[in-house]
Amino acid sequence: MSADVEQQRYDLVVVGGGINGTGIANDAAGRGLSVLLCEQADLASATSSSSSKLIHGGLRYLEHREFRLVREALREREVMLRKAPHIVWPLRFILPHQPHLRPGWMIRTGLFIYDHLSRRDSLPNAKRLKFDGNGPLVPEIQRGYEYSDCWVDDARLVVLNALQAQEKGADVRVRTRCIDAREIDGEWEVTLENRLTGGRDTVRAKALVNASGPWVESFVKGNAQRESRYGIRMIQGSHLIVSRLNDDERAYILQNRDGRIVFVLPYQQHYSLIGTTDRRYEGDPSQVGISEEETDYLLDVLNSHFVKKLGRDDVIATYSGVRPLCDDESESPSAMTRDYTLDLDRHGAPMLSIFGGKITTYRKLAEAAMQKLEPLFETLGAPWTADAILPGGDIDSRAAFAERLAREYPFLTTDQRERFASSYGTLCLRFLEGRESQAALGYPFGAGLTQVEVDYLIKREWARTSDDILLRRTKLGLLFDAPQRQALDSYLEGHPHLAGHALNSAAV
Ligand SMILES: Cc1cc2nc3c(=O)[nH]c(=O)nc-3n(C[C@H](O)[C@H](O)[C@H](O)COP(=O)(O)OP(=O)(O)OC[C@H]3O[C@@H](n4cnc5c(N)ncnc54)[C@H](O)[C@@H]3O)c2cc1C
């Protein structure tokens, strides 16, 4: 960069477009900072779309005495239900009880603490259950408990935070990798590479936030060339998707003999999500994939609880992610802390690195990040995110909004109405307004996805590839066959807004 070209200046450059990076960028922009967020691939393309999709206190973490984390997480359930009623909703969990596992008194105590550790406005209490042998569980399981947590569409939560950050003035750049960060005159000079064009840009920032998830430690040591005070341990977790195992909307939390727990979650209309595993991972985080051993482990836990027995052939799809946990030197992956650690390095230009965290507590993590950065920015605004609705969340409930769609757009199918209500909320009006028929929605790609929605996702939600659209923005991927995907790829390739930069999903 020649000295006579004026570089763009920001208060904050945030590296990483997962939940923590977008949450921090959003909070910071709303407090008046000028922010640039860069994400090397798609928003939520790494850990933040591979989670179990729960906003939960984590009943299991009580065993590890993580009371601070559990209390904060339990409180966030109510906050998130208010902030994002379109993509977050209550979920009842069934916990089958077998006396040879955790004793009944321990479970009852745990559930009592879970119910009372923080204030609940809407979620119902835990209760005991008796099974009559006619349900989906094996007849040996006769008793259990039921308690509350919440579901979230993880990838959409990330996009909504990016959208809100942009509304507040942040510069959001996807497919943009931070390849170098060096200190000049007490500030950061950050080099960004556009992965579609190969073009490079350097910008200046007063502070750098390293929210690169599984890459956090390598970013400190490699890109920023500093010492890292904390280490990261990558813990792989995988999920199976199978045909729906139970005919209601309740989830199951299964206790395995090894002390681990496995969730069976209602997923979309027709599927169940089974996960997760917990095992150390050493490879490239972007290449993580399920092993046969993990598949068999999950199927074994499932088969020892459910009447219906499943084999590998019943698995429709899988996904894996890497938890970027702060290395606390625990022996077992499941005992490692799920709490977050924020490391502000002020030796020279300030860099805040984020270690660990959960989707559930991203908003509190962002507030804690702002508290760390406060001494650097005299005019920093007050906390604001607890009461701010995320884009599209200005609805009474998903059901009420789906009914409004039925009245105003009677040509929509039931599946479209329900999906729009629980993915977009009022954001869908941006592509529906003025349309009076299915034909007016343009080319039907399949499973209710039409041209106007795809155009909206490209223009307003940073979608570039069919994976962005099918796996993260809409989660319609399971319903698409190869020719339908091909048609979507062809459309993206010719899309004027993408100007030839709709590369295939694997490339970016
Ligand atoms: C299997 C599994 C299940 C989970 N279940 C839950 C759950 O149910 N509930 C819950 O609350 N939490 C859950 N979690 C935890 C939660 O998913 C993670 O804590 C969270 O997603 C981490 O977000 P992040 O933003 O730190 O990281 P990421 O989502 O990985 O984001 C980091 C981003 O940084 C980008 N990046 C890296 N380097 C660069 C660079 N040089 N330039 C630009 N961009 C860069 C990456 O591409 C990536 O998108 C689960 C995690 C796993 C793995």
Image (spheres, rainbow, N blue to C red):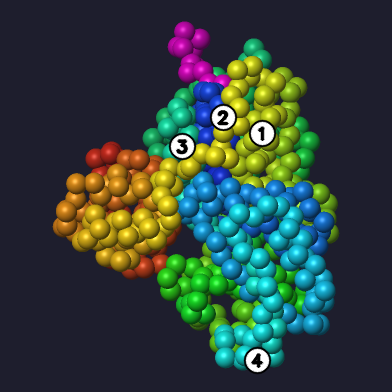
Question: Given the image, on which type of amino acid does mark 1 rest?
Answer: Ala
- Residue 309 located left or right of residue 403: right
Residue at image mark 1: 369
Query: Of label 2 and label 1, which has the lower sequence position?
Result: 2
**Tag 3: amino acid:** Gln
Which residue is the site of mark 2? 28
CA gap, disc 4 to disc 1? 49 Å
The magenta-colored residue range is 1-16
Q: Is residue 477 above or below residue 3?
A: below
* Residue 186: x %, y % from top left: 66, 15
Kindly check if marks 2 and 1 are in contact, taking CB atoms under 8 A apart as contact. Answer: yes
Is label 3 in a helix, a strand or a loop? Answer: helix
Give the crowd class for mark 4: few <14, some 14-19, many >=20 residues within 10 Å.
some
Judged left or right of residue 87, residue 138 is: right
Residue at image position (33%, 49%) is: 428
Residue displayed at 74% across by 55% down: 117
